[in-house]
């Protein structure tokens, strides 16, 4: 019985350190001053967006549903789990874009910068 509990606990692990760093960067990136985040039809500032996505990330990690930055984006940062509506991001006077596109582009840029 103890072995089963130990193995079950081992299966619920946080993502690898590299993935954790990428996800932390994405969470900080959403909080960029001058950017807004649309969730269920309401615009929120970056710090509110970051806090919301952090809660979703924590929830997903507890359920062992995040293995890398892509799985975080797909499962937690693309759409509302309540309504199914896509999240949007806009910065300054720019056009609103899907949060998945916004985060994937930043992840690509961040990885390119990290490999230099």
Image (cartoon, grey):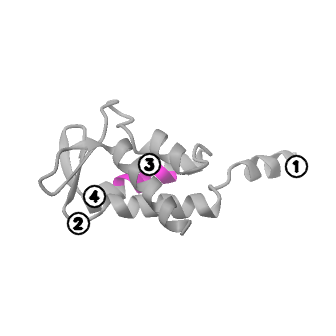
Mark 4 vs mark 3, CA separation in Å: 13 Å
- Which residue, as the protein is rendered here, is positioned at the far bottom? 116
Residue 99 screen position, x and y as percent = 33, 44
Mark 4 vs mark 1, CA separation in Å: 41 Å
Q: Secondary structure at mark 2?
A: loop
Q: Which residue is mark 2?
A: 33
**In the picture shown, does residue 78 fall above or below 3?**
above
Closer to the chain start, of discs 2 and 3, is: 2
Residue 93 screen position, x and y as percent = 11, 53
**In the picture shown, does residue 40 fall above or below 66?**
above
Mark 4 vs mark 2, CA separation in Å: 12 Å
Mark 1 neighbour class, 10 Å CA radius: few under 14, some 14 to 19, many 20 or more: few
Mark 4 neighbour class, 10 Å CA radius: few under 14, some 14 to 19, many 20 or more: some
Mark 2 vs mark 3, CA separation in Å: 21 Å
Is the C-beta separation of discs 1 and 3 under 8 Å?
Answer: no
Q: Secondary structure at mark 3?
A: helix
Closer to the chain start, of discs 4 and 1, is: 1
Q: Viewer-proximal residue, 59 or 95?
A: 95
Which quadrant is the C terminus positioned in?
bottom right
Tell us which disc is closer to us: 4 or 1: 4
Q: Which residue is mark 1?
A: 3
Mark 1 vs mark 3, CA separation in Å: 30 Å
Circle on res. 56: 3
| Magenta stretch in the rendered image | 52-58
Is the C-beta separation of discs 2 and 3 under 8 Å?
Answer: no
Q: Residue at x 36, y 37 (%)?
A: 79
């Amino acid at each position: 019985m103890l072995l089963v509990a130990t193995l079950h606990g081992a299966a619920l692990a946080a993502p690898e350190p590299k993935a954790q760093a990428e996800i932390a960067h994405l969470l900080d990136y959403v909080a960029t001053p001058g950017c807004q985040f649309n969730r269920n039809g309401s615009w929120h500032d970056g710090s509110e967006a970051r806090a919301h996505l952090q809660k979703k990330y924590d929830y997903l990690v507890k359920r062992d549903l995040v293995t890398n930055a892509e799985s975080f984006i797909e499962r937690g940062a693309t759409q509302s789990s309540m309504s199914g509506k896509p999240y949007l991001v806009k910065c300054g006077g720019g056009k609103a874009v899907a949060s998945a596109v916004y985060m994937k582009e930043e992840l690509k840029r961040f990885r390119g910068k990290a490999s230099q």
